[in-house]
Amino acid sequence: MKVLTIAWNNVHRALRDRTGLFFLVALPLLLVFVVGAAFGGAGTPVVGVAGDAGVLRDDPAVRVRAFADEPSLRAAVEHGEVGAGLLRTGTGAPLLLVRSDQAGQQVRLLVTSALTREANRLSAAGFVAAHAGTDQATALSAVDSTRVEPVEVRTSTTGTALFPENFSGFDLGAANQLLVFTFLNSLTTAAALVEARTLGVTRRMLATPTPAWAVVAGEALGRVAIALLQGLIVLAGSALLFGVRWGDPVGAGALLCAFALVSGAAGLVLGAACRTQQQITGLGILLGLGLAAFGGCMVPLEFFSPTLRTAAFATPHGWANDGFDVLTRQGGDLFSIAPNLAVLLGFAVVLFGLGAWWLRRAMTR
Amino acid sequence: MTVLSCSGLRRRFGDVLAVDDVSFTIGEGETYGLLGPNGAGKTTTISMITGVLERDAGEVVVAGVPMSTRTVAAKRLVGYVPQELALYPDLTGRENLRFFASLHGAARSRVEHVLGVVGLADRADDLAREYSGGMKRRLNVAIGLLHEPKLLVLDEPTAGVDPQSRNQIIENVRTLAAGGMAVLYTTHYMEEAERLCDRVGVIDSGRLVAEGTRRELVERLGERDRISLQLEGDLARAAAVAGAVPSVHGVSAHGHGLELVVDDAREALPAVLSAISTGGAVVRAAEFDEPNLETVFLHLTGKALRE
Ligand SMILES: Nc1ncnc2c1ncn2[C@@H]1O[C@H](COP(=O)(O)OP(=O)(O)OP(=O)(O)O)[C@@H](O)[C@H]1O
Ligand SMILES: [Mg+2]
């Protein structure tokens, strides 16, 4: 009972802190949005057109931006302002300007397929006009009114694709933000533990008929509850606001709980070890961002060298990141992330043991 | 009945022997003042008595129940008001009290009761951070009263507060002691100790150097009360009759006055006055000089209580 009282007191105070809440809730969601928008999410490719855009104007897959002449179009393509440029002036064949990067190739495909479709339409209309003796306009409308059952093509990726189809930029950012902020906030809000000791309230709790283990357990549970609450808010918030897919809900929930346990326990250790709030803030930011970077929250693990990849799996972030990867990209479930969960729980147990021992010592020594 | 008995308390921090062989007892309804300069070891002693600090040696027993950092039984009997403001500044007064009430297992109704006792009922829902210094001190005291302890331990409960809050706290403690509570009180204010404490212990550099009532301490130092009188009439005769009063130990005359050395100025005064008027002289003015704890303190520790 007293354990719950102390834990709730921690949560209650965290919720009351307005600036704290900003970092706890608003900032991670904001970053999910920003990162998501930067990496795609809202991206419809833009095609610059000098001359008649023709059929591209009505194509939902691209957006058209008009340019006056070739030089300005060429500059825009070179600067990456548009994905590609279509030059359709004079009498010659249309010219498509693209960069050699991935986005350029993607737009090239879109534009050529749109133009091919249009060419097919026109040639079909020509055929109808020639054989039925109607004029071109009637023939075109006849072609348009013909419904062709599309040839069914199913796409699947073979080999190990980095990102599966439908994997949006929002999905990419969200898992990383979740881990970065759950851990980071857990460390920095552990300043409350130091504050409680410097204020003397920890001693005062010990002067009540509350065993020291209950005080330690209450503080530890409070840390975990705050981490879990924050994780849940980012998880649910990003799913509801930006449509982020987290994969198997049971797996994602379990992974979040395990990571919240690790975060809470790490907060407990830091809160017991530090003597001043400045130490906590400094060390917390250093460890929070450092471990996140090593664990692949800043740069995806795929881009790591083999050595760095091994180092990544020395951090809880690495294991959690890998777990979310399995859930979101490979369609994994609770069973397939069991190793990740086990390692994270191991981290949590060790950190809890250390933190409890340390805090207990710091309280009555 | 003895409520607190501690014996042979010792605690070392690195090279500093903060408390060295401290022993004393406090009875029911008794208020005991622990006086000493900064760093004397008062807080360390109190922390061991309340079971929030490990001790190197010694015993603490509260109403027959042994106290340690690991027991909870004895802690039910003790109310602790720490020297620092041990409150959550981001909680309201009432929320602070409710939190500690649930740790003490005290009823919710006690929260409202102690709010009334310390005069914070109308500010109970303000954040503790927004309280004045005196109000914070009163809340600090209130938390120690939640569970109606047998022993109330207050570590400088009036440090840095306005006279009004100070009076309120002192009156609270008096009332509680009158109701049978044993009180252990430390302070830097001599007047406070004299007003409040039945007995005092003087601690210096970790050792209890003297203990007793104010009078006992004063006498041990060879200090005595003095009465100064301004007279009209026969000074020599007045000196003779006054010197004959049993509790008067010495008389000296100067100008229009007499100076008497007595055991207890307040007790001796009526007998002295009636003897002098019988002797035919008229007393124009009378003045006491009672050596106070400040004097005792200076004598014992060579330091002023407040530095
Ligand atoms: N946690 C600690 N670590 C190291 N030294 C300590 C610690 N607590 C107290 N001391 C030392 O023990 C001695 C006694 O300190 P204590 O706080 O008991 O004094 P005090 O009588 O309460 O003083 P004050 O009137 O200033 O409150 C001091 O020399 C102090 O520096
Ligand atoms: Mg002190």
Image (cartoon, coloured by chain):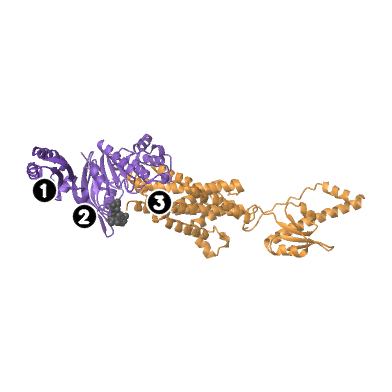
Callout in the foreground (2, 1): 1
Chain hosting mark 1: B
Residue B10: mark in rendering: none
| Kind of residue indicated by mark 1 | Ala
- Give the camera-side residue of A51 and A297: A51
Write down the quadrant of residue B26 in the picture.
top left
**Residue bearing the label numbered 1:** B253
Q: Are marks 1 and 3 in contact (CB under 8 Å)?
A: no
**Marks 1 and 3, how far apart at CA:** 64 Å
Q: Is residue A248 visible?
A: no
Q: Which chain is purple?
A: B
| Kind of residue indicated by mark 2 | Thr
- Give the camera-side residue of B254 and A145: B254
Write down the quadrant of residue B17 in the picture.
bottom left
**Residue bearing the label numbered 3:** A195
- Give the camera-side residue of A281 and A121: A281
Chain hosting mark 2: B
**Residue bearing the label numbered 2:** B301
Establish whether labels 3 and 2 are both on one chain.
no
Q: Colour of chain A?
A: orange
Establish whether labels 2 and 1 are both on one chain.
yes
Residue plotted at (17% across, 45% down) = B215
**Residue A46 position within the rendered picture, expressed as x and y whole percent measured from the top left:** 71, 57
